[in-house]
Image (cartoon, grey):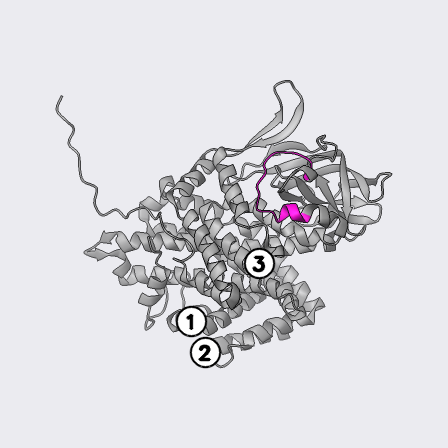
Amino acid sequence: MAGISSHTVTNQPPPLAGYDLFTADRALVEAVERHTPQALLDEVRGELSALGRAGGSAQLQEWATQANERPPRLRSHDRYGHRIDEVEFHPAWHRLLGKGVSAGLTGAWTRPAGHVRRAAGFLLWTQVEAGTCCPLSMTHAAVPALRTDPALAAVWEPRLTSTVYDQELRPAADKPGALFGMGMTEKQGGSDVRANTTQARPLAEEGTYALTGHKWFCSAPMSDGFLVLAQAPGGLTCFLVPRVLDDGTRNVFLLQRLKDKLGNRSNASAEVEFDGTWARRVGEEGRGVRTIMGMVAATRLDCALGSAGLMRQAVAQAVHHCGHREAFGGLLLDKPLMRNVLADLALESEAATALAMRLAAAYDDGSERERAFLRLAVPAAKYWIAKRCAPVVVEAAECLGGNGYVEESGLPRLVRESPLNSVWEGAGNVQALDALRALRREPGALDACLTEIGQAHGADHRLDRAVKDLFTELADLEGVEGRARRLVERLALVLQGSLLVRHAPPEVADAFCASRLGGDHGGTFGTLPGGLDLVPVVERARPVS
């Protein structure tokens, strides 16, 4: 039989693999250098570069594909009919999660410059497989809530900040490392957690309770412990629910089903029932929301970091593709209209990275001024960065044409992931209303944000004008709830503009201020005004492979 004729494949870009996610991201490298003490800089750069090389490897990219193609399965009973309520993951998931834990992505609270180095690592790790970031985020964020009870923190914090991943369900005292999840929302209440109906009945031992009720969304249900809200005699209260009790028996933790989600396919989210479930109170009765808010604030920052990571990976893929693909007589990258699109996307990515890393630095600082800054800047940044993620990722996928719509490209996975951080830890309206609450109740929060913005005063006339417009919005708070999204958007944009004017190359700051603050921008990406120097903006976003 005659051989079948073949053809030579040409004009296809090589895979974006075998590179360092960290050193290839100039905006992130500069943010780390800006916010890390000089004495620690070599150590932190080396640590992040090692993580970046691992994350950019073909091996980990293959593990991420495997984890998504084989999502977790619920095993409610064993072969004999005993209820076990376990979640079964593909081995690739455990390998990825183990690498995230070993990289210190749950250990920000115990290391110098811990939040900056951990935030940069989290942003990198989101680009590998965002599904593993949920348990990493929850575990990291549980620490401030647990610290309201020093006895509980003494038991759990060393394990939550450990670099050892132990997937076995055993008593915490027997484990070198542990993971945490969270359960707040219920069917009838959603974001209105004060409508929760789960009941907490006090037991004989001081501080212990039996929980009865349900959680509509429980994150990371395979974890060793969970922070949940329930109605105690004194009101809504925060509780720690261990998965395994001290005597080795399984706590009552009934996994009713796993959620079939749009994206985040490798990760498990569950509906959980409590039926006499043993729990330990965290904080005082009736102060559950206040107790758990430290966890919520930390996870909200992770939503901003995660969205920044997704945007960075999407932009990197788009620039990489266009830097190798020829069309109409030249590289796509060199076509003026495509350059405009890529530069526009790169601006959004860099602004998100700069703001998210500035928030991480505020956590490391820990001063009262920086804590006040976080109370307003976190919900504003979470709102805006998460909102920008989906349109950025979808436009980046379009840069690959039909290839970007094919699963093998990896872009569809980013597209499905891109709306998630807008929904998790309080959707857009919740963030906007929380920002209003900070404005009304904590004047120091606005002062801190304005002080931050004011460091760029006089450096760009468009930024100065945008700040004046923000003052106008703030001066008229009548009926402000209906304008909350508009107000928070403007606050986030001037924060980003201030950071870029002070720290980014002039070409980046000029293009951002002209389009985002000066109003010279259309309704889609690729509508930057003429006269801007876009070549260095795109080159800055190009990943080195």
Q: Is there CB contact under 8 Å for labels 1 and 3?
A: no
- Determine the CA span between mark 1 and mark 3: 28 Å
**Mostly what secondary structure, the magenta segment?**
loop
Image height of 74 relative to 519, above or below: above
Image depth: mark 2 or mark 3 in front = 3
Of 367 and 512, nearer the camera is 367
Measured in 3D between alpha carbons, the distance from the residue under mark 2 to the one under mark 3, in whole angstroms, is 33 Å
User: Mark 1–mark 2 contact, CB under 8 Å?
Assistant: yes
Position of 71 compared to 511: left or right? right
Helix, strand or loop under label 3: helix
Residue at 67% in and 56% down: 294
| Dot 2 crowding, Cα within 10 Å, few <14, some 14–19, many 20+ | some
Determine which of the numbered discs, if any, sits on residue 460 in the image: 2
The amino acid marked with disc number 1 is: Ala
The N terminus sits in image quarter: top left
Residue bearing the label numbered 3: 114
Q: Amino acid at mark 3?
A: Gly
For residue 509, the mark is: 1
Q: Give the magenta part as a residue range.
A: 157-172
